[in-house]
Image (tube, helix red, strand yellow):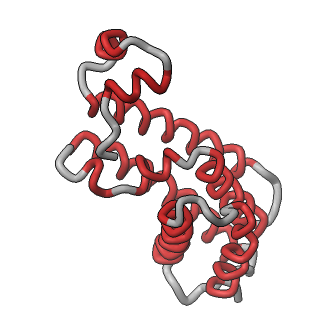
Amino acid sequence: IQEFTVKNLSKKIGFVEAALYRHFPSKSDILIAVFSFLEAKVLERYNLISKNDCSATEKLYDTIQSYIEYFSDNPALVIVHLNDGIYKNEPILQKKILSIMDDTKNHFEQIVVEGKEQGLFRLDLQSSDLAIMIMGLMRITITRWSLQNDATDLKAQKDSVFQLILTLIKI
């Protein structure tokens, strides 16, 4: 992230640095735009999955697949989205990333509630706790992949991650 400068970004995307500053007064403003884009994409994916007429188990699998494929196809977003250091001292960035986390938690929680209603998932644990557990497993899986410099196939891990989650939450 130390190399994330407006100068390097402008060079990478083929814009003159001054053109970026016309649209984004600071690096924080660029990150806010990236987070806003990410949040819109996340909500779009979650809404599509939520509307599917299928079991909670299938929705859970579709969400895990979507999440893993998105980061696998956009590895630079792992650094932006999962790196606490980027937004540590930036309240507006903290608020934006927390909003994305809340969207994700709410989506997983909705799936867990549906799974409980369908008699598929454990009733003895709070739906919000299960949602956070799922998010934690997803985060560690993607972060490990990123720290290994994408040496493994993240998409190939989705079935084992899904099976582990099912083992923990199914009846």
Residue at image location 49% in from the left, 22% down from the top: 13
Q: Is residue 127 visible?
A: no
Quadrant containing the C terminus is bottom right
Q: Is residue 113 left or right of residue 139?
A: right
* x and y percentages locating residue 38 in the rendered image: 50, 40
Q: State the residue in front, 71 or 146.
A: 146
In percent of width and height, residue 109 lies at 55, 65
Q: Is residue 104 visible?
A: yes
Q: Give the x, y percent position of residue 20.
A: 35, 16
Q: Is residue 127 above or below residue 102?
A: below
Which residue reaches farthest left?
89
- Of 59 and 33, the residue lying toward us: 33
Q: Is residue 149 above or below residue 123?
A: above
In the rendered picture of this protein, how many numbered marks are placed on residues? 0
Residue 15, quarter of the rendered image: top left
Residue found at x 67% / y 58%: 63
Residue 140: x %, y % from top left: 49, 71
Foreground: 94 or 141? 141
Q: Residue at x 57, y 57 (%)?
A: 107
Residue 29, image quadrant:
top left
Residue for point 42% across, 39% down: 35
